[in-house]
Image (cartoon, rainbow, N blue to C red):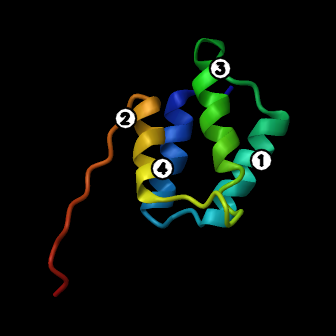
Amino acid sequence: MITRHDVAGKLAEHIRRRLTLDELVAWAEQAMMDAEFDEKDLEVLTRVIGRLGLADVREFGLSWEDLEEFLAALGYQARVDISRVA
């Protein structure tokens, strides 16, 4: 069963560059076809995951603002730390 936490985790992996856009899109497409969603969050989960499944289409893309919006809808917030490279 896919929960808000699961989707936020996938977004975090993508932000941290541990999951490519193509991998994120493939996960989202597979989830929309096969996964069961936490019933209490069905609306937000299907909206966010459905949109992620289109992120590889030029007209849709995936901006930082999109990621922030999705995380907020899921009950999370992104924070960015910047450090000097030695």
Mark number displayed over residue 57: none
Q: Which residue is drawn at the image coordinates 26% and 50% (left, top)?
A: 79
Residue 84 x, y percent position in the rendering: 15, 79
Visible in this render: residue 80? yes
> Nearest the camera: 60 or 43?
60
- Residue located beneath label 4 in the image: 66
Q: Quadrant of the N terminus?
A: top right
Gap in Å between the C-alphas at discs 1 and 2? 22 Å
Kind of residue at disc 4: Asp
Callout 3: SS: helix
Kind of residue at disc 3: Leu
Q: Which residue is drawn at the image coordinates 42% and 57% (left, top)?
A: 64
Gap in Å between the C-alphas at discs 2 and 3? 17 Å
Q: Quadrant of residue 2?
A: top right
Gap in Å between the C-alphas at discs 4 and 2? 13 Å
Residue 25 x, y percent position in the rendering: 69, 55
- Residue located beneath label 1 in the image: 29
- Residue located beneath label 3 in the image: 42
Q: Label 2 neighbourhood size at 10 Å, few (<14), some (14-19), many (20+)? A: some
Q: Quadrant of residue 86?
A: bottom left
- Residue located beneath label 2 in the image: 76
First in sequence, mark 1 or 2: give its number.
Answer: 1
22 lies above or below 71: below
